[in-house]
């Protein structure tokens, strides 16, 4: 049983604590001159707390959890990529198409048959769009469908 | 008597037709959220917050809906415990012990009905406890000064891991991270902190985005990793035949469980899991050899169910009166309050009395609704339970996206949410709890304000933080809360595991 995870995490957090604490010393002096407590007081306390607890983590780490390997890493990366692409495409493609693609791809990657996956995406997209537009009166981007709206 | 008048006013609020409707919707959604795999109560409530916003609901309606969701989720968790031996959420673990054997004997419907009645009794007792205790505690809390509040916040963090928590240092670590994220933005003196010139960060990190990202997105990633998209097979429930005598038999167990659960819920660091555990253990002790626990004794279903629902209502006491939540889900409810510009704490009972008492009345009404929903409609929930996560989770994720997007219409917020999701995935891998991070985000500004206040008054003298007897007491409890898990935790955890293994 290795304990590398907690050690690495501890080191990273220690670096963060030092950087954060150093950042606190760099704040400009507030208007009206320095007082006994300023914007930097609380962050400094936090930096100390984080530094101490990350040191503890380095000294006394817990046993590791297994990290995913190979294909599953790929699946996870795909999922995150889909979510980023969803955000990216929401405005230009419109809510319905973007949802069809995003939800469909996620369902498919989680093990649904492709046809059923994209059908789920399409139905979910249309239903939520109609619900938001007509029942809740909220505008979601129409994207490529906006040509229909003008007429 | 004052309380009674407020409560009647509260019923006036809660019984308004649109509030009643939202309570019903909330109760239904809550049961669903509790029942479905991969959608814990905190997660479910978090996803619904942005929707409550975009609907433009008035604060009392939004709160009524979400407390109904909260109450409903506790009901829902038991369904899969009983039918599948898989707890829908952690507190429902003890329900498996006797619920599943009952289902195996062909008494699934009875087990479900008994647990619904027990849940109802537990919540009812705890809500009455809440009505009696909350105003007293609120009055007491009015004597708190800045130093006491600071100590109280520390106590909240220290006990958050609970007595059964694994590594208290990781709770401290997580709390520090959450508080650090809360310092991002422009502070009260107008100084920019950690904004790095990014315009979107000037107003700080929106905790709703953080909450939804940490819970919803990381859950999706975990399901993908476990390849658990397949779901479970269809389940059958027999026709209900429950006599009045059987209901009467479980009443003492429900009442005992409810009272114990309430106490466990109010106390810092105990929580619903412990409530249901104590509820079960006590039943076993009280009934003794006359029972057949572990083999489908109805009292073994009633005790822990009443305990877990009692605890979840009890957990609202510190949240409403002190503004200090004791669990993940109450933290999310606190997030809702803060974002509606209501400062929780003792002053809420005077300044927003209509909201507080409306919510408490809604809790009572919600329980009746839940009982009505849960006995005849349990078949529907059972059907929905067999929706495989591979369809469910992508849709839930999409709803989370829509919710966040509809708050601000900004893509930046969505990227931020995804980033928080990935962050949450790593945290869970490292077993760093996420609730302290969220609590840190929520309480950070208040905590800093109270620290500054204390130090300003005392002219920079740090000992002012433990200047009063009350403050010292709070610090001591906080310290004990942090150390106790090291001593008692392993023993309690072993017992809970042993109880579970003994049943299998």
Image: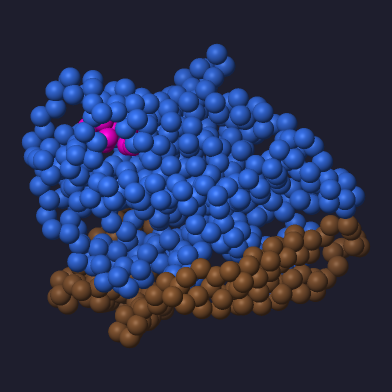
Chain colours: A brown, B blue
User: Looking at the picture, how far across and down is residue B339, in whole percent?
Assistant: 55, 50
Residue at 25% x, 46% y: name it: B503
| Left or right position of B475 against B320 | right
Q: Position of residue B376 (x, y in %)?
A: 17, 34
* Residue B329 visible in this rendered orientation of the protein: no
User: Measured along the vertical axis of the image, is residue A29 above or below residue B238?
Assistant: below
Does residue B316 appear left or right of residue A116 in this picture?
Answer: right
Q: Position of residue B193 (x, y in %)?
A: 72, 68
Magenta segment, principal secondary structure?
helix
Question: Closest to the observer: A94 or B464?
Answer: B464
The quadrant of the picture occupied by the N terminus of chain B is top right
The residue lying furthest to the top in this view is B1
Name the image quarter holding residue A96. bottom left
Image height of B356 relative to B189, above or below: above
Question: Taking B13 as reference, is B89 above or below it?
Answer: below
Residue A112 showing in the rendered view? yes
In magenta, the rendered stretch is B298-306
Residue B22 location, x and y as percent?
Answer: 36, 39
């Amino acid at each position: 049983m290795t304990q590398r995870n907690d050690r690495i995490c501890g080191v990273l957090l220690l670096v963060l604590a030092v950087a954060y604490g150093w950042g606190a010393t760099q704040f400009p002096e507030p208007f009206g001159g320095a007082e006994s407590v300023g914007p930097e007081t609380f962050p400094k306390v936090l930096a100390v707390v984080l530094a101490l607890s990350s040191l503890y983590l380095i000294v006394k780490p817990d046993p590791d959890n297994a990290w995913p390997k190979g294909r599953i890493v790929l699946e996870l990366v795909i999922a995150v990529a889909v979510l980023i692409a969803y955000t990216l495409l929401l405005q230009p493609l419109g809510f319905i198409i973007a949802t069809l693609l995003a939800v469909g791809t996620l369902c498919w990657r989680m093990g649904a048959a492709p046809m059923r996956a994209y059908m789920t995406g399409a139905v979910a997209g249309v239903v939520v769009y109609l619900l938001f537009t007509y029942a809740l009166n909220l505008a979601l981007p129409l994207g490529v469908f906006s040509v229909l709206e003008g007429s | 008597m004052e309380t009674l008048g407020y409560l009647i006013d509260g019923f006036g609020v809660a019984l308004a037709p649109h509030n009643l409707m939202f309570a019903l919707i909330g109760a239904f959604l809550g049961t669903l959220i509790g029942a479905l795999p991969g959608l814990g109560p905190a997660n479910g409530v978090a996803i619904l917050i942005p929707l409550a916003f975009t609907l433009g609901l008035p604060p009392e309606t939004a709160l009524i809906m979400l407390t109904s969701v909260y109450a409903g989720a506790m009901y829902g968790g038991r369904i899969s415990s009983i039918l599948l031996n898989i707890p829908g959420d952690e507190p429902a673990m003890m329900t498996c012990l006797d619920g599943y054997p009952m289902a195996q004997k062909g008494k699934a419907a009875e087990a479900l009905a008994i647990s619904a009645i027990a849940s109802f009794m537990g919540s009812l007792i705890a809500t009455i406890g809440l009505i009696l205790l909350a105003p007293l505690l609120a009055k007491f809390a009015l004597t708190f000064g800045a130093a006491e509040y600071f100590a109280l916040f520390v106590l909240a963090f220290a006990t958050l891991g609970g007595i059964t928590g694994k590594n208290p240092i990781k709770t401290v670590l997580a709390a520090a991270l959450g508080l650090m994220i809360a310092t991002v933005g422009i502070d009260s003196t107008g100084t920019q902190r950690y904004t790095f010139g990014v315009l979107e960060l000037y107003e700080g990190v929106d905790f709703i985005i953080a909450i939804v990202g940490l819970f919803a997105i990381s859950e999706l990633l975990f399901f993908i990793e476990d390849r658990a998209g397949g779901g479970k097979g269809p389940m059958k429930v027999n026709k209900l035949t429950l006599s009045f005598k059987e209901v009467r038999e479980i009443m003492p167990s429900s009442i005992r469980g409810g009272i114990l659960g309430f106490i466990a819920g109010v106390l810092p660091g105990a929580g619903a899991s412990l409530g249901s555990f104590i509820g079960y253990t006590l039943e076993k002790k009280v009934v003794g050899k006359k029972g057949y626990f572990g083999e489908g004794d109805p009292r073994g279903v009633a005790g822990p169910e009443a305990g877990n629902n009692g605890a979840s209502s009890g957990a609202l006491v510190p949240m409403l009166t002190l503004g200090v939540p004791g669990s993940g889900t109450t933290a999310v409810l606190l997030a809702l309050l803060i974002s509606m510009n209501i400062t929780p704490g003792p002053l809420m009972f005077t300044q927003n009395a209509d909201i507080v008492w409306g919510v408490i009345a809604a809790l009572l009404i919600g329980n009746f609704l839940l009982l009505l929903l849960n006995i005849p409609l349990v078949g529907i929930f059972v059907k929905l339970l067999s929706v495989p996560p591979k369809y469910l989770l992508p849709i839930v994720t999409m709803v989370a996206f829509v919710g966040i997007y509809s708050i601000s219409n900004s893509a930046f917020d969505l990227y931020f949410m995804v980033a928080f999701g990935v962050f949450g995935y790593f945290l869970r891998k490292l077993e760093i709890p996420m609730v302290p991070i969220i609590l840190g985000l929520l309480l950070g500004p208040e905590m800093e304000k109270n620290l500054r206040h204390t130090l300003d008054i005392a002219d920079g003298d740090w000992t002012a933080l433990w200047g009063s007897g009350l403050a010292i007491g709070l610090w001591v409890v906080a310290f004990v809360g942090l150390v106790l898990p090291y001593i008692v935790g392993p023993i309690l955890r072993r017992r809970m595991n042993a109880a579970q293994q003994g049943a299998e």
